[in-house]
Image (cartoon, rainbow, N blue to C red):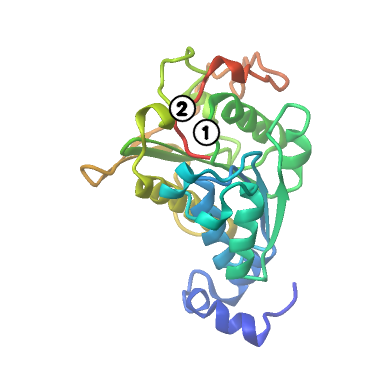
Amino acid sequence: MAALTDLQIERYSRHILLPEVGGKGQKKLLDSSVLCIGAGGLGSPIVLYLAAAGVGRIGLIDADVVDISNLQRQIAHRTADIGRAKVESAKEKAEAINPDTKIEVYRDRITKSNIMELVGKYDAVIDGCDNFPTRFLVNDACYFLKKPLFYGAVLRFDGQASTFLTSPDAPCYRCLYPEPPPPGLVPSCQEAGVLGATVGTIGVIQATEFLKWALGIGTSLEGRLLFYDALGLDFRTVKLRKNPDCPLCGPNATIKELIEYDESCDLRNGSEA
């Protein structure tokens, strides 16, 4: 592990001053990697804060282009970026913050055919997607590859976050939601709306959870589901245990390979991507 340069010591001085981080911790961040699913509402604060923190390598996957309606909350993009690929726009902003961080972009959608290779390239995964088929596919791939998963979702004024699969006894996303909900049960942000700053709050929590895990410090959200109510400015957590009947990680698991649910079923759940 190479020593920090004088310029890096200056850049990361506020991290290095923290006894829990120090120079050794900063070098851990520079040697870490993470795959971020989505370059939109959640992905924007995630990639910007992780780049600023000095995470060495960030993979960013998203197939969409910037639309004017995104700009109310997707802070990695500007008016001049309308029509550009989101991954290219976000890469430009993140690398402008910190050239130490390598941003690897994939202008594509997560599918059964590409997810195992993508997830396998990184230490962990942060889920900033906007639909249930992708969320379940990401969870299952992380379980099979034994990769930590940092989850977040937002709709209207409410958000939730958790950390999955950081230890053998940790629950997975299917312990919380065994299967996708019926089509049309949960409205999308396009249908119900979303307060932009709420997305920023949850994205920053996801980024914080990854940084703590990479540094090996603090108490994570593993085993807890955090709920955030922006209108009441209220945070609360509920315990989340490993489900013995989980179809993926339970002792009598029935899911032995990846399942690709049909996105045409309109299973969007409002989590911003």
Name the residue at 52% across, 20% down.
267
Q: Would you call the spot at circle 2 few (<14 residues within 10 Å), some (14-19), or many (20 or more)?
A: many
Q: Quadrant of the N terminus?
A: bottom right
Residue projecting furthest to the bottom: 6
Vertical order, 6 against 79 (above or below): below
- Circle 2 — which element? loop
Vertical order, 217 against 98 (above or below): above
Name the residue at 60% across, 20% down.
263
Is residue 126 toward the left or the right of residue 240 in the image?
A: right
- Circle 1 — which element? loop
Q: Which residue is mark 2?
A: 269
Q: Which residue is mark 1?
A: 130
Residues 218 and 61: in front is 61
Residue projecting furthest to the left: 232
Residue 179 at what x, y percent from top left? 53, 17
Q: Quadrant of residue 126?
A: top right
